[in-house]
Amino acid sequence: MLTTERGRIVLGLFAITVLGIAAVYLFGGKDSNLVTQTVVTGLLLGGVYVLVSLGLTLIFGVLGIVNFAQGAMLAMAMYLVYFMVSSAGINPYLAVVLSAPIMFGFGWLVQSTLMNRLITDVGHSRPLLVTLGLSLLISNTLLMIFGGRPLNVPSPYAGSVQILGAIADVPRIIAFVGAVIVAGGLIVILRKSPVGLAIRAVAANGTGASLVGVNVKRIYAMTFGLGAASVGVAGGLLAPFTSLVPSAGDQFTTLAFVIVVLGGLGSVPGALVGGIFIGLLQTVGSLFLPGSGPLLLVFGMFVLVLFLRPQGLFGANK
Amino acid sequence: MKKHTLVVVAVAVALGMSGCSGTSNVAASGDSVDSVTIGSIHPLSGSLSGVGGLMNAGAKMAVADINEAGGIGSLGGATLVLNEGDSQGKAEIGQSEAQRLISEGAVALIGTYQSDVTQNVASVAERAKVPLVIDVAVDDKILEQGYSYSFRIQPDATSMGASGARSLIAMGEATGTEIDTVAYIHIEGAFGGSVFEAFKTEAEATGITVADEITYSGANFSDATTQVTQALASDPDVIVVTGYFPDNLLIAEAVNALKPDIKAVFGIASGAYDDNSFPAAAGEAASNILSANYHYSATSDRAADIRTRFEAANGESMETASMLSYQAVEVIAAALEESGSVDPEVLRDAISSLSLTDPLLEFNGPIEFDENGQNINATVVVMQVQDGAVEQVFPTEIATKEAILPAFSR
């Protein structure tokens, strides 16, 4: 692992993170319990960011579509889970499993009926505008059906556990585990399955892939569907600790784009590592900087990485 | 990549500048005495559409009630018409909506829920010499411009911070609870900052130490554990909180998870802690949380009747913001009745010298405006979530339940 470039990056980032946290413990002048709590909270927040970024990195990386509807789709998935829980009374985590294929179907439909007509065009502005319209359509439909007052999905596993003296919220731990599982699942699909091979081929060179017999438009639809399904799982896992309003997904959109570009377009491991890193950076940063300060830190780091590695941490060198 | 970035920026800019209003245009003219048009501006779409919709519904109900009771008597029974504007939560859209409503004949405006939107609408109202009755908008600055056409029913940020501090101290004394140190968590920006400053000044004058001030960004906040842990590091007796619904809910949940040895969580101008949907949303975490805020009167029969009918008509509980919109329409109607004129300048003078008794909010007295346009009798009351419901607990004259302080037994 050490011999590959990717291995060195992972190790380097890990070393920076550990050294940074150690420095905060030793020289930060903060109570060590407080720092432990912050690190645990940061890891869990990172899990949330990973969940939100996974779908985006697929859609952005393979299709080249800047999906402005990401936040709205996330909210849609949350409301889907809310609807199943409140009307049928099923367990929210079962609802997550059910909402993933529904979102897959939705993504497939959007790509095959709308996007595939535009994607052959030169430039990326048309699909982008369609996603923008889609986002307005989704959030206003949600507003019409559910209203704008905050709703909530009660978690059957509400409560918290102690980790090294720090408090960790159980639904957030479940979301973190879910993030790792979804990331692992996507890596397996992309690396080991024939569909994954086709997706990677299309991402690398669409024309080449179609020459060797890959149905590119079908792969596009499949990819958008997979991305939407990831968003579906994300929304469902986030719902138990989020105030549900039609704009609930928007606060994650900007950071998700940052994480996806930071990790490298289309790279699932990149989104995983990038998300956790950003979550930690933001939370530990909030110990020292008030208000929006931690976000400044995040964007500063983003600019630095882009300067040193424009293709992102795990991006292919094009 | 470069192309992507350019397109993203272009779209983001376009998104910020564009925006269309989806409201219906009600034809009206200010000269007619058959009907009088009031313009309302609230966020009917966007992230604040929930509360904006409630406020709009409150104003609509006030107009319907007044018309049903015979309209404006001194104008020969003229009926009120509400022309609805949508600010989309954006200052520049609110401003253009204000211009549209005035050009369509509104003799007075109400709105707008957000301080930045209100600031822009107030400047339009001032230039057009049309009175603006602010239902909700907390920032002190709005009325510090020397405007003569803006009036505010609710208390401003500074008075809420100061009276919040006084209420906390008085409650501590009344219940024999020692409160020496507080930590303050608030949203960054003018709203959180000005409430905090006023609280700090008032609290420190009476010997309470504000041990820590922790701010967070409202735009990106999905976990409050770090902020609450930081607040607890100074070992406070009470954690004081100012912010909006989602963030304040997260803070309550983090406090509940950490189960700290504090005597109370005390919201001031909190968007969550006295909202009727808060107890259900937070569950166990809502229990015994205190909130100093302006509030619809829970002791007035008139307010109770309005709330019952509102809930029957809209299927949703009538929150305080919505009651303030109702009240704002009543203020304008009373001034129309008083002046017998639809000339906005005459109407302004009538509002300015108005004394409206039996307010729908738990205030110190009738609604009367000082020379800046601030309602001099506006004040906060303290509420507490008890048994899954928001109850008024302080001052004792208006209490619906007795205060539980210390709020936690840990």
Image (spheres, coloured by chain):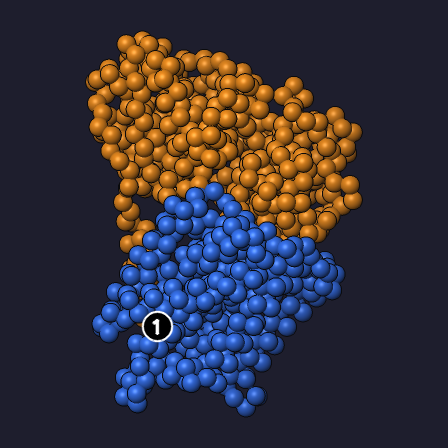
Chain colours: A blue, B orange
Q: Quadrant of the C terminus of chain B?
A: top right
Is B278 drawn above or below residue B399 in the view shown?
below
Q: Residue at x 33, y 58 (%)?
A: A134
Q: Which residue is drawn at 29% across and 38% down?
A: B23
Type of residue at label 1? Ala
Q: Residue at x 72, y 32 (%)?
A: B404
Residue assigned mark 1 = A221
Q: Can residue A230 be seen in this view?
A: yes
Q: Position of residue B285 (x, y in %)?
A: 66, 45
Total numbered circles: 1
State the residue lying farthest toward the front. A88
Callout 1: helix, strand or loop? helix
Q: Where is residue B70 in the image (x, y as percent from the top left)?
A: 34, 13
Q: Can residue B129 be seen in this view?
A: no
Is B386 drawn above or below residue A299 in the view shown?
above
Q: Position of residue B95 (x, y in %)?
A: 31, 37
Q: Position of residue A73 (x, y in %)?
A: 41, 59
Q: Quadrant of residue B77?
A: top left
Residue A101 or residue B31, whichever sits in front: A101
Residue A247 or residue A285, whichever sits in front: A247
**What subunit carries mark 1?**
A
Is residue A141 shown left or right of residue B362? left
Q: Quadrant of the N terminus of chain B?
A: bottom left
Is residue B330 shown left or right of residue B303? left
- Neighbour tally class for label 1: few under 14, some 14-19, many 20 plus, Cα within 10 Å: many
Q: In which quarter of the image is residue A144?
A: top left
Residue B192 or residue B48, whichever sits in front: B48
Residue B139 or residue B4, whichever sits in front: B4
Q: Residue at x 23, y 21 (%)?
A: B30
